[in-house]
Image (cartoon, rainbow, N blue to C red):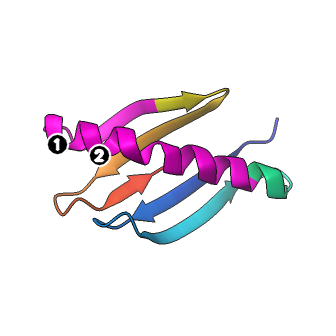
Amino acid sequence: MAITASFIIVSRNDIPIYEAEVGSATKREDAAQLHQFVLHAALDIVQDLAWTTSAMFLKNIDRFNDLVVSVYVTAGHILFIY
């Protein structure tokens, strides 16, 4: 079973700084677009949760089929989404 994951660093103003696809599966264009869509859709949830909790690691904030989104929020509100 081959697994791929997406990783995005997002600035305070919701501007993507870095994006990467990591994994051993063959690269498919539609899979990469699906990962990007799911990660960007989770930004709204992250913004709501980041201001209501003191936790820096937000685990399993969003799910789509077998894709799960987790986020690490820095003190400067830079988001590490995977």
**Residue 28: x and y, percent?**
85, 55
Q: Is residue 30 left or right of residue 18?
A: right
Q: Position of residue 32 (x, y in %)?
A: 72, 55
Question: At 40% from the left edge and 63% from the top edge, which residue is drawn?
Answer: 10
The vertical placement of 81 against 61, above or below, is below
Q: Which residues are magenta?
A: 32-61
**What number is the disc on residue 47?**
2
Q: Are marks 2 and 1 in contact (CB under 8 Å)?
A: yes
Q: Which mark is residue 51?
A: 1
In the figure, 60 relative to 38: above or below?
above
Q: Is residue 11 left or right of residue 20?
A: left
Q: Amino acid at mark 2?
A: Gln
Circle 2 packing at 10 Å, graded few (<14), some (14-19), many (20+), is: some
Q: Secondary structure at mark 2?
A: helix
Residue 6 in sight in this render: yes
Indicate the secondary structure of the residue bearing disc 1: helix
Which image quadrant: the N terminus? top right
Q: x%, y% of residue 7?
A: 53, 56
**Which quadrant of the figure has residue 58?**
top left
